[in-house]
Image: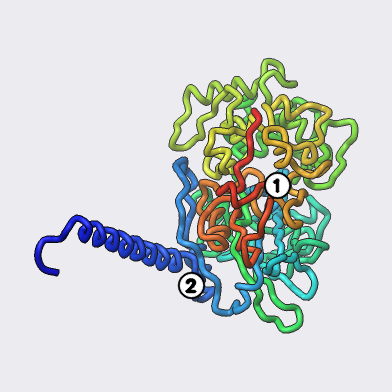
Amino acid sequence: MKGKLTVHQRRAWQARMRVIGAISLALIAAAGLFVILRPQPATAQSTDSRSAEQTPALHAQAAIRTPQAPTRSQTAPLADQYKIIGWNDLGMHCMNESFANLAVLPPYNNLWAQVIRQGPNPEIVTSGVSVEYSIIDNTYSAGKTNFWQYAKQLFGADLAPNVGLTGATLAGQMHSASDHFAIEGVPLTPYRDSAPQPIPQNWYPYQLAKLIARDSATGQVLAETTTVAPVSTEMRCDTCHADGMQEGIRTGNVETNILTLHDQEEGTTLMSSRPVLCANCHGSNALGLPGNSELPNLSRAMHNRHAPGGDAAASPWLAAAQALTARADSSTIPTAVTDEGTDNCYLCHPGQQTQCLRDVMYSKGVTCIDCHGGTAAVAEPARRPWIDLPRCGTCHASQFAENDGKRYRDSVGHGGLYCESCHGSPHAILPTIQYNDNIQNIALQGHPGTLDTCTVCHTQVPPGAGPHGINPATQRRIYLPLVLR
């Protein structure tokens, strides 16, 4: 074009350039989105090794790190027709580091999963399908713990090495139920094969489990996923029960210090009865043991004993914590706070390093105390441990509440999916600050957080209301519960 453009010609040219630019940007964005969301072929070995080698930042308090999504294996040609979602029921399982003197909890983990056949009306599938599980970089437990040396004395079970109390091992088939698959009693430790020595430096509490769904008749892989199987031995009894901290007791071992103190104050003979299973006397719903009906259950006994103003006169625990705070070496001993904050829970529960409370609520400033109450509240005689638990409906609107009479981990919602399948486990409500917790949902939908992308299960976004009665067409983030307090 020669000569000076007229006003009309210039405006027409500018309009054409804007259209061309918009189309170009749209094409670039579409190409980028395709690269992000399309399934990338990779071998199962490469996916697993990348996940297993990534150690979570145990001390991280910052925003969530978004890892690259692991990709499905070339051996799963039907992964676009089926999906499998896995989870752990509690968000953290605890076990003793040693069983030579006393036992609170054995190595006992679990995995749950649901298999979904995709379509306009997705279906949860349990027949004609099998689900196998394995733990990445963790094929044995004997030698990482002395549990099998004392299992017979503690639990009356004559177990072969690497076999748990239910007969489960570290790899095998999950059992099918009416709407899910599960395996109970996996004897998992927080130590990987690549760093098996049971020392704190090797703690890896957010173990990764590989779940593979197969056609039962042909063995063909339908779908696979990687989820977290959490476990920790971080019970910091040494904070208050190290040598010389209680009644001048010095046995050279924290656990025998505790047993000696118990013998002195309660007139028992635990030191001569080792190893001691605490739940034999103090009942435990976690273990299904009734204990002695004339004694408080284990949860009440522990929380009441260690609560400021509890059974112990002038609360020796509180005095010990205050003394520790005054002289604590933060490089070797966790700081003990005495104001009923979360760190109080971490004196017994995992823990200063493990940080089992790591979820989106933690990121918003919610503490253990906000949901569970203080140690004295947990010790209330009427409370049923492991049954009377915090409920979502207490803080969130009614459409986000659990099923009537059921705990969060037992409740189901949209299309029969368990709440945990979309939202994550207690203490690990998605997204969390731990890398491994977010792997599964990034692989399923391309971003961390609640499973909120309809097309993970639906072949197209359905019209009308979705989970919790929310219409995804009118609210982009369909999981944003109303907080009532």
Residue 73, image quadrant = bottom right
Instruction: Look at the picture and state if 22 lies above or below 323.
Output: below
> Which residue appears at 60% of the width and 54% of the height?
452
Image quadrant in which the C terminus is located: top right
Disc 1, SS:
helix
Q: Where is residue 391 in the image (x, y as percent from the top left)?
A: 73, 37
Give the total number of marks visible in the rendering: 2
The residue lying at 52 percent from left, 49 percent from top is 434
- Is 245 situated left or right of 47 in this image? right
Which numbered disc covers residue 469? 1
Q: Is 321 or 360 nearer to us in this picture? A: 360
Q: Residues within 10 Å of mark 1 (few under 14, many from 20)?
A: few
Q: Is mark 2 on a helix, strand or loop?
A: loop
- In the rendered image, the residue lying farthest to the right is 293
Q: What residue type is labelled 2?
A: Gln
* Residue 334 rendering spot, x and y as whole percentages: 51, 34
Compared with residue 364, is residue 321 higher up or lower down, i.e. above or below? above
- What residue sits 31% from the left and 65% below the top? 20
Tell whether 288 sits left or right of 20: right
How far is mark 2 from mark 1, CA to CA? 34 Å
The residue lying at 80 percent from left, 28 percent from top is 267
The kind of residue on which mark 1 rests is Gly
**Residue 314 sits in quarter:** top right
Q: Where does residue 284 sit, x and y in percent of width and height?
A: 80, 41
Callout 2 environment at 10 Å: few (<14), some (14 to 19), or many (20+)?
Answer: some
Whether pointer 2 and pointer 1 mark residues with C-beta atoms closer than 8 Å, the reply is no
User: Is residue 455 or residue 462 the one in the foreground?
Assistant: 462
Question: Would you name the residue on which mark 2 appears?
Answer: 40
Between 313 and 112, the one nearer to me in the picture: 112
Q: Position of residue 152 (x, y in %)?
A: 79, 56
